[in-house]
Image (spheres, helix red, strand yellow):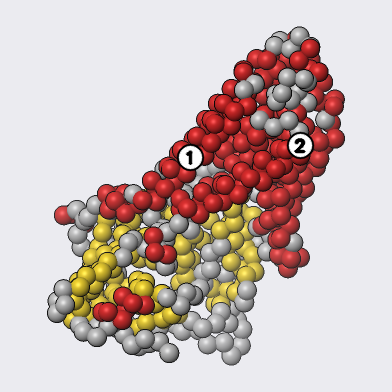
Amino acid sequence: MSQILHIFRKDTRMYWMEILALLLALSLYAFLYPNRWNYSPTAMRSQYLNLLLPQVLVPAACWLLIARLIHAESLVGDRQWWLTRPYERKKLLAAKALFVAAWIYLPFVIAEAVILKEGGLSPLAHVAGWFPLLAIASAYGVFPLIAIAAMTSNFARMTLALFAAVIVWLGATALAFMPRGGYESAAPNDRSMWIAVIVIVGAAVATLIQFATRRVLLAVATGAVTVLLATGTAMWLTATRESRIDRAYSGPAASHASMQLALAPYGLAQVKAVFSERPDKIYVTVPLTFSGVPEGYAAQVDDVKAALDDPATGQHWSSPWWTSRTMRFLPGEHQAQVEFMLDRNQYERFKPSPTRLRLALAVTELRAGSDTAAALAAGDFPVRDFGVCSGRWLYRFPAQPMCRISALDLPPLTHVSTVWSRTNEPDAYVPPGPITAAAWADTSYDNELFLRLLPVWPVRTLLYPHSIYGDLNSTRGLELAPGTPIHFTQYNVTRRTQVSLTIPNFRLPDEPR
């Protein structure tokens, strides 16, 4: 133990400047991070700093510190002077691990905890949430840097190796996660963490091999196998996406088969074709009505799949699961528009004659849970089981509840609702009856692994006024006064299902000009 502490103290004395650089970067990050939920013009102008710091300064300082730490006793070659010292390699490894824990992980956790505290959220409210956060930081930062440093002899070679690793990682990511035909899915993917686990285990094994045997080729081979396994896993996740969505959204149960779709052109909402950002793709928009959501439930459309059949020629085309926008529905009848994307040659093939269009929607059914009422205030006010909110001006609207939530303990999807109050403003016409407002506070970031590194997320909810006469064009004569009750109703996932619609004699619209 004395040798471990000796090496730890020696490294701390030698690299105090690098430690200080990392501490300063983390301090600046924690100091500026609250601008993310401060919507003043001054804070908005400094948003780029909040992107620069976590993505550049902190990783760069961490990279420098790890390189200096590992290269102090380089593991490459057999002419290093430290080999003449009576260092046991297992104790050397333990001392380096203690250094990383004390001067990288601990300051990082403290900075994240300070940000949570500044946001009015408890760092200890959900201790289990720290594990995925630290796992992601380890997989995409600390562990690969340690492994690369252990396999190189100096900072220059580590820089070249790191540059090559980044190029390989970007190429592997593009190859593995490239959507089929340009289609991307919003369906939940709870297996992405597998890749992080593979990277952590592979980097740890490569580092252990290098410390135990100092056989560089074996460690490099282990790193290469790790990259192949991670890439292969990502490719498998992409290749099996269709079958996994089909299994997850397995079809309606008899008790809740009431959700229905119907073709419903209205006003400007007609079947139409729209050019995409790519000249070889065309979006076809289909107006629908969505109904039949049971009382006490909500429905969220995650993905859509389309299939075209031409009875005259026998031609068939189908798309993979794809999403273009998130739609959520409460009980009642709702107007909606779904899109599917065609290649231009497919569009030309099916356009001349009537076809049969089958639309399938991947729908997540949610059940209303806890309902929390909080009084709107100009300052911060806590919302139980959700986060912290404050009444802030947003765009042309008066006070709006601007909220922030903890990445350690994400609340479920939440529906925010209230009733606007009338003011004494002269010449302001407000229709009779209650003027209500509602919005969804989207907290579903399950697929955004890197966002887990950001401890506090701002959630914007625009409570637009509407009445029995429809949406109002102005908030003139209305206000959300301090003390106005705001209701936060949480919706929990109960099951995932499919809702389908078959449209016979469907004609593709004329090509846009």
Percent coordinates x, y for residue 456 in the rendering: 61, 49
Residue 307, by quadrant, is bottom left
Q: Answer left or right for 453 relative to 509.
A: right
Camera-nearest residue between 186 and 210:
210
Percent coordinates x, y for residue 260 in the rendering: 23, 67
Percent coordinates x, y for residue 296 in the rendering: 31, 57
Q: Which mark is residue 394?
A: none
Contact between marks 2 and 1 (CB within 8 A): the answer is no
Q: CA–CA distance between discs 2 and 1?
A: 26 Å
Camera-nearest residue between 471 and 278:
278
The amino acid marked with disc number 2 is Phe
Residue at 46% in and 84% down: 431
- For label 2, the SS is helix
The amino acid marked with disc number 1 is Leu
The residue that disc 1 covers is 228
Residue 109 makes an appearance in the image: no
Crowding around mark 1 (Cα neighbors within 10 Å: few <14, some 14 to 19, many 20+) is few
Percent coordinates x, y for residue 30 in the rendering: 72, 46
Residue at 16% in and 77% down: 313
Which residue is farthest left? 312
Q: Answer left or right for 360 relative to 158.
A: left
The residue that disc 2 covers is 155
Above or below residue 401? Residue 277 is below
Residue 140, by quadrant, is top right
Quarter of the figure that contains the N terminus:
top right
Residue at 35% in and 83% down: 272
Residue at 76% in and 9% down: 86
Q: Answer left or right for 444 relative to 75.
A: left
